Image (tube, helix red, strand yellow):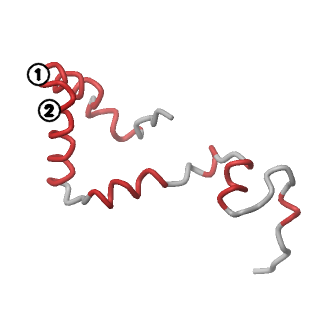
Amino acid sequence: MKRKYEPELEEFALGALCDKIRSKGGNDLAAIAILDLARLAGLSITDLEKQKGVLPAFANAIWSDVAAKFDLDPSRDVYQLDIFSV
């Protein structure tokens, strides 16, 4: 699944930057640049891997995906949840 850039990142033209880096040194240089950027940002490989599991924004949530993450039956609606009060 292709991940869309967050609106805040559009101003950095990451797609164009990636194309420029790849044109100068291919995927190897792109990988080095990505790792260097992560190092400069103080991010470890573990930090980056955590981003793969970030849940989508609530407005984009789909019941079948959300239900599966909570071990609920996606073929049933929200009434399978226990009643609770706040």
Ranked by sequence position, the earlier of labels 2 and 1 is 1
| Relative to 84, residue 39 above or below | above
The three-letter amino acid code for the residue at tag 1 is Lys
Residue 34 percent across, percent down from the top left: 21, 42
Residue 9, quarter of the rendered image: top left
Q: Which residue sits at x=21%, y=29%?
A: 27
Return the x and y of residue 30 as percentages of the image width and height: 19, 33
Task: Tell me if 25 is positioned left or right of 72 in this view.
Answer: left
Residue drawn at point x = 80 percent, y = 57 percent: 73
Horizontal and vertical percent for residue 35?
Answer: 19, 47
Number of residue marks: 2
Which residue shows up at 75% across the image and 80% down it?
86
Q: In this view, does 4 lie above or below 43?
A: above
Which numbered circle lies on residue 85?
none
Look at the numbered discs 2 and 1 and tell me whether their residues touch, using CB distance below 8 Å.
yes
Where in the figure is residue 48, as x and y percent of width and height?
33, 54
Type of the residue with mark 2: Leu
- The mark found on residue 29 in the picture is 2
Q: Nearer the viewer, residue 57 or 26?
A: 26
Q: Is residue 76 above or below residue 20?
A: below
| Within-10-Å neighbours for mark 1: few <14, some 14–19, many 20+ | few
Q: How far apart are marks 2 and 1 (CA)?
A: 8 Å
- Label 1 element class: helix
Q: Name the residue under label 1.
A: 24
